[in-house]
Amino acid sequence: MTRESFLKKSLLTAAGLYLTPGLVSAFGNQMLMKTIPSTGEQIPAIGMGSWLTFNVGESEHERAPMRNVLMEFINQGGRVIDSSPMYGRSEQVIGELAAELEVTDKLWVATKVWTQGKAAGKRQIENSLGHFRKWPSVLQVHNLVDLDTHLETLRSLKGEGKLKYVGVTHYLDHAHKQLAEIIKREKLDFIQINFSVRNTAAEDYLLPLAADRGVAVIINQPFETGGLFNYIQGVSLPAWAKEYGINSWAAYFLKYIISNPAVTCTIPATTQVAHVKENMAACYGELPDQATRIKMKDYFKKNAL
């Protein structure tokens, strides 16, 4: 190993971005990894969401596109997949397709509890366990519904060694203040929040607070449910974006997010294999520094329709 490569590896390890040999380095063909503060475990910085996309029926016509998406995600090095009982049949479909493809053990599953009452919450967790055919890595209280009741259940499961991580989620800016108060008073492994290159409210206080408290952060709605692409129709990527391995607007949006040091992972959703490839491409190559992140945000705002 040369002195230069040693220094790069050391910097990446300190930043939680170095993957074991055979997978990535931010300066080569290795995947960008982020570290979960509470354990030191590393996961890929790009995962996959399942709201709307995996909520399909039994027919091969409906299942085939999502089977292909899941297989491509795994082939591209993806592991983190997020779901919820709120998402219709998504948990069941993911679990069944993963079993068909024999990739169940490759998935790092994040799912949620979304109901009122302890008994109902426990039933949802049992259902999720049945769908995925293994324990999720993290269970999250979805949109803070019956928060204290479900946190008690999740902590009990963690104490029994069945569950590794406990978290909470929301998807709207107005919940950020409440989330900040929660992570100040509760010991959490994860929060999941909304954040994008257009909506950067989380950067003002919540993301720095999570980093200070040692809480991992999953970002939902990185494309604002696809809405971000409407703002840049006909707009070319800046030439300097290629310096960071950015060859699509999807990668531009995702690299802005994962280059924030407080962000652990983001979970774009799609029904198209081509989009999986674009999304996962953002998990490779150098990450923008803070000066470049500002330039990225400014370029988007200047050129957004």
Image: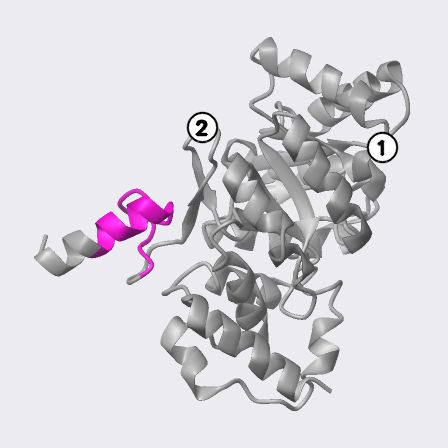
User: Badge 2: how crowded within 10 Å, few (<14), some, or many (20+)?
Assistant: few
Q: Residue at x 23, y 51 (%)?
A: 9
- Give left or right: position of 89 versus 270: right
Extent of the magenta region: 8-26
Numbered label attached to residue 145: 1
* Residue 113 point in image, percent of width and height: 78, 29
Q: What is the distance, in whole Å, between disc 2 and disc 1 at their CAs?
A: 26 Å
- Residue type at numbered disc 1: Val
Q: Nearer the viewer, residue 48 or 100?
A: 48
Q: Quadrant of residue 303?
A: bottom right
Q: Secondary structure at mark 1?
A: loop
Q: Nearer the viewer, residue 281 or 98?
A: 281
Q: Quadrant of residue 203?
A: bottom right
- Residue type at numbered disc 2: Thr
The residue to which callout 2 is attached is 39
Q: Residue at x 56, y 12 (%)?
A: 161
Q: Is residue 138 one of those drawn in magenta?
A: no
The reply to whether residue 167 is in sight is: no
- Give left or right: position of 24 versus 180: left
Q: Is residue 12 one of those drawn in magenta?
A: yes
